[in-house]
């Protein structure tokens, strides 16, 4: 995955949660500066770390959607 696409994907993933960078960092145990750096394209997570994070974020979104559904 290209660095710019990964940057955009990471930001989009966080935005799907509706969280700020600070809240996202706290929820998923990642330093806020790391989130900032990823979204600005200064650094990128390793592919396996990205896949792990994506899996957990998608699960979090799914669980929260279930809790909100009647």
Image (tube, rainbow, N blue to C red):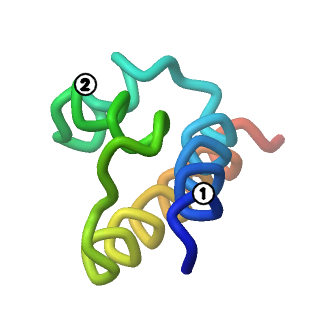
Image coordinates of residue 37 in percent, x first then y, are 33, 35
Residue 9, percent from left and from top:
62, 57
The residue lying at 67 percent from left, 46 percent from top is: 12
In-image side of 32 versus 70 (left or right): left
Please say if 48 is above or below 65. below
Which residue in the structure is indicated by mark 1? 4
Label 1 or label 2, whichever comes before in sequence order: 1
**Callout 1: few (<14), some (14-19), or many (20+) C-alpha neighbours within 10 Å?**
some
Give the x, y percent position of residue 66: 67, 52
* Residue 27 placement: quadrant: top left
Residue at numbered disc 2: 32
**Number of numbered discs overlaid on the protein picture:** 2
- Give whichever of 52, 1 is nearer the camera: 1
In the displayed structure image, the side of residue 14 where residue 70 appears, left or right: right
Q: Looking at the picture, tell me which residue is in the foreground, 56 or 12.
A: 12
Looking at the rendered image, the disc whose residue lies closer to the viewer, 1 or 2, is 1
Above or below residue 68? Residue 36 is above
Image quarter (top left, top right, bottom left or bottom right) of the C terminus: top right
Q: Alpha-carbon distance for marks 1 and 2? A: 19 Å
Q: Which mark is residue 59?
A: none
Disc 1, SS: helix
Q: Give the vertical position of 6 relative to 30 (above or below).
A: below
Please give the name of the residue rendered at 55% of the width and 80% of the height, measured from the top-left corner.
1
Which quarter of the picture shows residue 25? top left
Label 2: which secondary element: helix
Q: Is residue 23 above or below residue 28?
A: above
Q: 10 Å neighbourhood of mark 2: few (<14), some, or many (≥20)? A: some
For the point 35% across and 42% down, the residue is 42
């Amino acid at each position: 995955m290209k660095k710019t696409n990964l940057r955009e994907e990471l930001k989009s993933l966080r935005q799907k949660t509706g969280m700020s960078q600070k809240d996202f960092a706290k929820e998923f145990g990642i330093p806020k500066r790391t989130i900032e750096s990823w979204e600005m394209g200064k650094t990128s997570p390793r592919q396996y770390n990205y896949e792990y994070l994506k899996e957990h974020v998608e699960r979090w979104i799914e669980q929260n959607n279930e809790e909100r559904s009647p």
